[in-house]
Amino acid sequence: MARIRRGLLYFVVLLLVVYGADFVAARSNPLGSLQVAPYYAIHLKNKKVEFDFNVPTETQNCVQSLAPHFGYPPCWYLKKHTVERIDE
């Protein structure tokens, strides 16, 4: 039982070190930005959904890191999610 607790402690310490190093790296790198194409999903009263794709693209800021920091998503995640659905 003590080995499991010690292993769990080492794992938590490793996660904190990686997150801390990622935070320091995110502070030193400037923010990036990517173009995101939003579209609206409008819910109608007859329980159907109407889509509006006539929306201009937006520039969203992202941070060059593994995890989100400062309220921005990581750029590697935003590159894979360049289309954003907005429900109304």
Image (cartoon, rainbow, N blue to C red):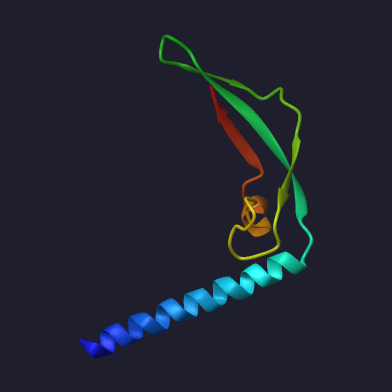
Quarter of the rendering containing residue 67: bottom right
Q: Nearer the viewer, residue 11 or 50?
A: 11
**In the rendered image, the vertical position of residue 51 relative to residue 23, given as above or below:** above
Name the residue rendered at 41%, 80% in the picture.
Answer: 11
Residue 17 drawn above or below residue 41: below
Identify the residue at horizontal 42%, vertical 77% (top origin).
Answer: 12
Residue 10 picture location, percent across and down: 41, 84
| Residue 52 position in % (x across, y down) | 63, 21
Q: Please provide percent x and percent y for residue 53.
A: 67, 25
In the shown orientation, is residue 5 left or right of residue 17? Answer: left
State the residue in front, 35 or 48: 35
Residue at (27, 84) in percent of width and height: 4
Image-based side of 3 in relation to 34, left or right: left
Q: Position of residue 49 (x, y in %)?
A: 49, 19
What is the quadrant of residue 31 in the picture?
Answer: bottom right
Rendered position, 16 above or below 44? below
Residue farthest along the right direction in this orientation: 30
Q: Residue at x 66, y 44 (%)?
A: 82
Outermost residue to the top: 45
Relative vertical location of residue 53 with respect to residue 46 in this rendering, above or below: below
